[in-house]
């Protein structure tokens, strides 16, 4: 069986004990950290030469030019099938509509109180870097998910880095998505070296202000290391994760395929079934085994599920969500008929999908909200990529004479209490006479 069985029925420990009892993702950050640190140092020191060397080493491609010509990006629209073009356009419009709503609802009126007016300003970053994975699969949907909210935020320059294919090219679906979303520059550079290039700049790639997009553990570690040099959104989104919560009424074949969906993304992922029905656990496990045996990606699926696949038995829904909230998965599917009634039990998840008719795959492509989500338990404090990740918030304060007269004495008192006489004098010098 590919899903390791965990049985928490009758468990009476507290939250801390439960957290310790649950398996944790393999901690390879130290090894990855050393590798990524070396890559970043090389890119900072040697720029494009390092990018070409790493592209040859990791992708097996020798490149003369890193940037994909703008004409090639636009021409990809004519080379892709009409059905794909329609899908990109529909997904674009739906994602755009959602993020435009998000942007508008984030604006607030001026705050006024006691003679002080606070005006809320939002300012986009000047240049955003998007990363779309490649190699095992192509992800035009990720290009849309990263670039569209940047455009809605008002970012002037949006760039994309994506690993090249074996022949040194970037596939047409990815380039077409870049054209649809209005990406300004596309670079055929992947891995930790791409993150370093966007953070620090090279001869070909100007540095950015924010880096977004998912990737493997090396990409995630690179984002962690450059965080602070640039903004890094969505809590270092890494390998894909799902928790499926199933009850006695859950169709086992649906739970099984949704577990395999996330494992399909590649190594280091997580696919957990949590159920209070042993019959459902047995049926789902059997379905997963059958799906994997018949899949053309059987090797990848077996590797992912062999290290990150679990079928967890619990006493009931309350314990199921207690475990899920500790795992804090990227995707949480509640595949029960009464899914909406269980939503109040959710505290930590990147995105939630309610009911048997709501697979996470819809969220991956065109539900509207972003599919770039926090992983590795960072959903405890982080959220999906959103327009705000590309904007800064500034408050502008205006103080009237009346406001200063009313509040100034309190400022003086606090300043003197803290031993900051100039702070107090800055108010006294303005005191209305």
Image (spheres, rainbow, N blue to C red):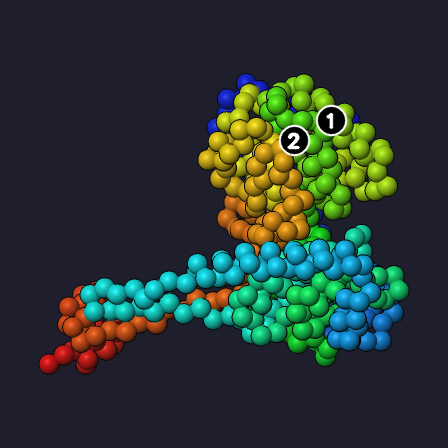
* Label drawn at residue 231: none
Read off the residue under disc 1: 285
Marks 2/1 in contact by CB < 8 Å: the verdict is yes
Q: Position of residue 224 (x, y in %)?
A: 61, 58
> Residue pushed farthest left?
433
- Position of residue 351 relative to residue 120, above or below, is above
Q: Which mark is residue 273?
A: 2
With 31 as the anchor, is 103 left or right in this view?
left
**Residue 123, position in %: x, y?**
47, 71
Identify the residue at image location x=80%, y=67%: 78
Across and down, in percent, residue 251 comes to 67, 26
Rendered location of residue 301, percent (x, y): 79, 39
What residue lies at 57% left-to-right and 46% top-to-bottom?
Answer: 350
- Residue name at image x 74 percent, y 60 percent: 85
Give the quadrant of residue 330: top right
- For disc 2, the neighbor class at 10 Å (few under 14, some 14 to 19, many from 20) is many
Residue in the foreground of this view, choosing between 118 and 199? 118
* Local secondary structure at mark 1: helix
Q: Is residue 400 visible?
A: yes
Residue 35 seen from this side: no
Relative vertical location of residue 292 with respect to residue 208 in this rendering, above or below: above
The one of 353 and 168 positioned closer to us in this rendering: 353
């Amino acid at each position: 069986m590919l899903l390791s069985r965990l049985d928490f029925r009758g468990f009476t420990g507290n939250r801390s004990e439960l957290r310790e009892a649950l398996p944790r993702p393999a901690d390879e950050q130290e090894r990855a950290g050393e590798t990524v640190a070396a890559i970043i140092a090389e890119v900072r020191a040697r720029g494009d030469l390092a990018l070409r060397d790493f592209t040859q080493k990791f992708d097996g491609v020798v490149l003369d030019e890193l940037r994909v010509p703008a004409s090639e990006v636009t021409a990809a629209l004519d080379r892709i099938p009409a059905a794909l073009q329609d899908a990109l356009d529909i997904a674009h419009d739906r994602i755009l509509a959602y993020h435009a709503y998000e942007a508008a609802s984030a604006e607030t009126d001026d705050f006024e109180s006691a003679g002080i007016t606070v005006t809320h300003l939002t300012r986009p970053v000047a240049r955003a870097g998007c990363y779309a994975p490649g190699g095992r699969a192509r992800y035009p949907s990720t290009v849309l998910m990263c670039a569209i909210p940047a455009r809605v935020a008002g970012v002037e320059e949006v760039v994309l880095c994506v690993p090249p294919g074996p022949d040194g090219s970037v596939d047409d679906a990815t380039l077409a998505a870049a054209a649809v979303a209005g990406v300004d520059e596309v670079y055929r550079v992947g891995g930790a070296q791409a993150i370093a290039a966007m953070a620090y700049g090279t001869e070909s790639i100007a540095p950015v202000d924010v880096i977004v997009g998912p990737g493997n553990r090396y990409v995630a570690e690179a984002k962690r290391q450059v965080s602070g040099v640039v903004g890094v959104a969505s809590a270092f989104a890494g390998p894909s994760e799902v928790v499926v919560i199933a009850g006695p009424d859950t169709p086992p074949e649906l739970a099984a395929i949704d577990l395999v969906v996330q494992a399909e993304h590649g190594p280091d992922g997580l696919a957990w079934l949590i159920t209070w029905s042993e019959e459902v656990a047995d049926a789902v496990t059997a379905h997963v085994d059958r799906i994997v045996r018949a899949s053309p990606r059987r090797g990848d699926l077996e590797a992912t599920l062999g290290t990150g696949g679990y079928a967890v038995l619990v006493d009931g829904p309350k314990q199921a969500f207690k475990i899920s909230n500790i795992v804090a998965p990227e995707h949480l599917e509640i595949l029960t008929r009464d899914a909406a009634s269980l939503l109040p039990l959710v505290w930590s998840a990147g995105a939630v999908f309610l009911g048997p008719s709501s697979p996470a795959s819809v969220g991956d492509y065109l539900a509207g909200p972003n599919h770039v989500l926090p992983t590795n338990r960072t959903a405890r404090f982080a959220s999906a990529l959103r327009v705000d990740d590309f904007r800064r918030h500034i408050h502008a304060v205006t103080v009237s004479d009346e406001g200063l007269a009313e509040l100034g004495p309190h400022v003086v008192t606090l300043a003197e209490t803290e031993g900051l006489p100039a702070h107090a004098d800055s108010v006294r010098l303005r005191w209305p006479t």
